Amino acid sequence: MSRGAIRRGTVVAHVRTIAFEGVETVPVDVQVMVAPGKMGIHIVGLGDKAVAESRERVQAALHASGLSMPPKKVTVNLAPADLPKEGSHYDLPIALGLMAALGAIPADVLDGYVVLGELALDGTVARVTGVLPAAIGANAMGRGLICPYDCGPEAAWASADLDILAPRSLIALANHFRGTQVMSRPEPAMGPRQGNLPDLADIKGQEGAKRALEVAAAGGHNLLMVGPPGAGKSMLAQRLPSILPPLSPKELLEVSMIASIAGELADGRLSDRRPFRAPHHSASMAAMVGGGLRARPGEVSLAHHGVLFLDELPEFTPQVLDSLRQPLETGECVIARANHRVSYPAQIQLVAAMNPCRCGMAGEPGHRCARGPRCQADYQARISGPLLDRIDLRIDVPAVSAGDLIRPSRAEASAAVAQRVARAREIQKERYAALGLPGSTINARCPAALVEQVAAPDAAGLALIEDASEKFGLSARAYHRVLKVARTLADLEGVERVGRIHLAEAISYRIPGERLAQAA
């Protein structure tokens, strides 16, 4: 809210901006008071270093815009005062509040806007992160938005009715308010379609692994591939995005909000391509699940509604791997610190690859490990049982034979597989919509209370899973995940009832492959 009040030579202006708590926004009232006293700007309200430095940027930008500082004391209060303020996006609201207090712009023109932006020393408005969540928050408040020019296309996605001003500089904004220069509303922009994604047709052999990849894509299931170096595990994972359906409008907005907070929206353009994140195994816990002074989103949240690929899974530190338990189970990443608690959505599909042992060749014909079985056991033990329990599909990826490489025939293309995956996902969408669940629900995210209803097996299938539960000692989570995978297999075939053949294949994916069994 912007208003001027004169009390004994004191002028106070109010400008509304926001603070970020995860992807949520909290209203902040920027109060600028010009009063008699020693010349200077004082900023209070629990701001960080970037906020404290706003003083210098605002002074320089106003000077470059032809507006001199008054020979008075300027006090800026960021209310509520007990809420931590972080980032450089407070520059523009502070400058506009000061301009309103000095009469450079009308005092009431900012009443209906939420303002954010960083100022350069020459008075131009630089891009900031988090404009999309800010625009959505402003729309919820019934206000317009003033943001940097480069962020305008991003903000335009919030609502077609949202009043958006995206100035290049302070002078342009002041001229707009005076009526001498009118700014047009920015238009939402979609990023260009990414180039041709890696195609499944490039992979020769590995038919079993391709089948598992299709099942994982159709139901959003977590996948673990175990095999020697050069078997094609990374190639398979990199081709998963080519068979996944594009993001729905709701998913697109959720993914883009997280990317906006992280500053990863190029030129404010959104893309309907599902995220694919592949962090290095040296990544810290803060990099993986989020954290730092500003509680930024980590790789898990940036992969929301997409794929998180962890190559060389045992090489990640045990603490980092175990931090994935909560996001995999709840679809949410909670960063709890002494001074704040932030939650980011993290509905991810985990795809992991690993060698069977340190030397990588355990189980290969003609190879004998110098350390013996202990090499495999120690290497496999780096992955905790609870984490393995959350992985639906575990497959063995053997080395590709020379015959497969020489064979001239081309394998099935990703486009054909993507069509089958899309049909299976459409079946799931209709099923869960009829049950009152969100349209984006997939089999892997089916609530435990509904699993036995939507994936009820026939009599032969029920007998099979009872025997398997007793033989392999399946946990309650494992039992439900077997049913979910079987449900996905039935959806791929377009069958309403889960049969024995679907459960048999699901169980075969659930139990450890040959190498994992050897390591155990």
Image (cartoon, grey):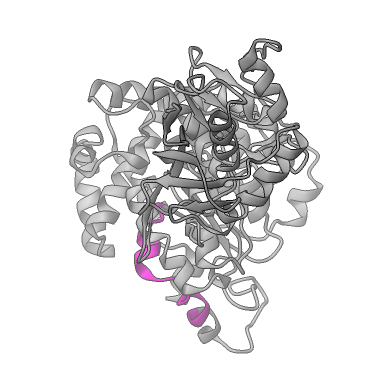
The reply, left or right, for residue 196 in relation to residue 457 is right
**228 lies above or below 463:** below
Q: Count every numbered label the image shows and give the total.
A: 0
Q: Is residue 357 above or below residue 409?
A: below
Residue at position x 63%, y 44% from top? 71
Q: Is residue 503 magenta?
A: no
Q: Which residues are magenta?
A: 377-392
Residue 464 placement (x, y as % from top left): 24, 49
Tell whether 222 sits left or right of 500.
right
Q: Residue 113's x, y, as percent? A: 48, 24
Q: Quadrant of residue 243?
A: top right
Q: Nearer the viewer, residue 365 or 446?
A: 446
For this view, does 125 lie left or right of residue 407? left
Residue 147 shows in this picture: yes
Q: Nearer the viewer, residue 67 or 430?
A: 67
Q: Does the image show residue 413? A: no
Position of the C terminus by quadrant: bottom left
Measuring from the top left, give residue 177's x and y in whole percent: 61, 16
Quadrant location of the N terminus in the rendered image: top left
Q: Is residue 184 left or right of residue 80?
A: right
At 55% from the left and 70% from the top, the residue drawn is: 316
* Residue at the bottom extreme of this rendering: 371
The answer to whether residue 199 is above or below residue 295 is above
